[in-house]
Image: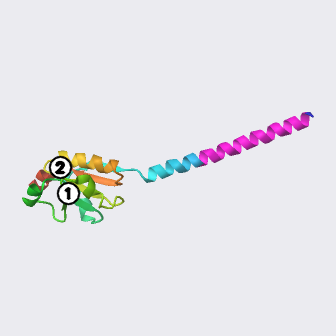
Amino acid sequence: MIKLIITISALSLFSCSEAQEQNNATTETIVKKEKQTAVIAKNVTVQEFKQLIEKGTGAIVDVRTPGEYTNGNIEGSKNINIAGNFSEEIQKLDKNKPVYVYCASGGRSSRAMQTMSQMGFKEVYNLSGGYSAWSRQ
């Protein structure tokens, strides 16, 4: 009888241990998946911005008004006014590719970067100092 009780106890401990190991593996997989979908939302200097856009892998977005955009912009940029239908227009971009945003001085594009991060964009880079800093260099 005592052997039976010991055997049952040992089996139940082994089962709990195995279940715990499976639980740990599942948790580890979830954490790894979360790390893979980490969002990059970063303010960068003019020099860093230039280096990033030279790679040609993402979209350059000017969030200023159409009038500001017409007065000067970064070559290859698309004007998506943050004060317009920004959320609707920005959804047309690939969320898995980098997006490089700028405005006149960095304030509006910083807000745009935060919005895009919340919308699920994987990489968003904001030009610190905006187009003003860009045109000075």
Q: Secondary structure beneath disc 1? A: loop
**In this orientation, does residue 8 appear?**
yes
Q: Is residue 16 a member of the stretch shown in magenta? A: yes
Q: Secondary structure beneath disc 2? A: loop
Residue 37 coordinates in the image, percent (x, y):
42, 53
For mark 1, does the 10 Å Cα neighbourhood hold few (<14), some (14 to 19), or many (20 or more) residues?
A: many
- Residue 4, by quadrant, is top right
Callout 1–callout 2 Cβ contact below 8 Å: no
| Quarter occupied by the N terminus | top right
Residue 113 coordinates in the image, percent (x, y):
27, 49
Q: Which residue is mark 2?
A: 83
Question: Is 82 on the left or on the right of 19, as rendered?
Answer: left
Q: Amino acid at mark 1?
A: Ile
Q: Which residue is mark 1?
A: 80
Q: Decide whether the magenta segment is chiefly helix, strand or loop.
A: helix
Q: Which residues are magenta?
A: 2-25
**In this orientation, does residue 48 appear?**
no
Q: Amino acid at mark 2?
A: Ala
Q: Residue at x 75, y 42 (%)?
A: 14
Residue 2 coordinates in the image, percent (x, y):
90, 33
Residue 10 coordinates in the image, percent (x, y):
80, 39
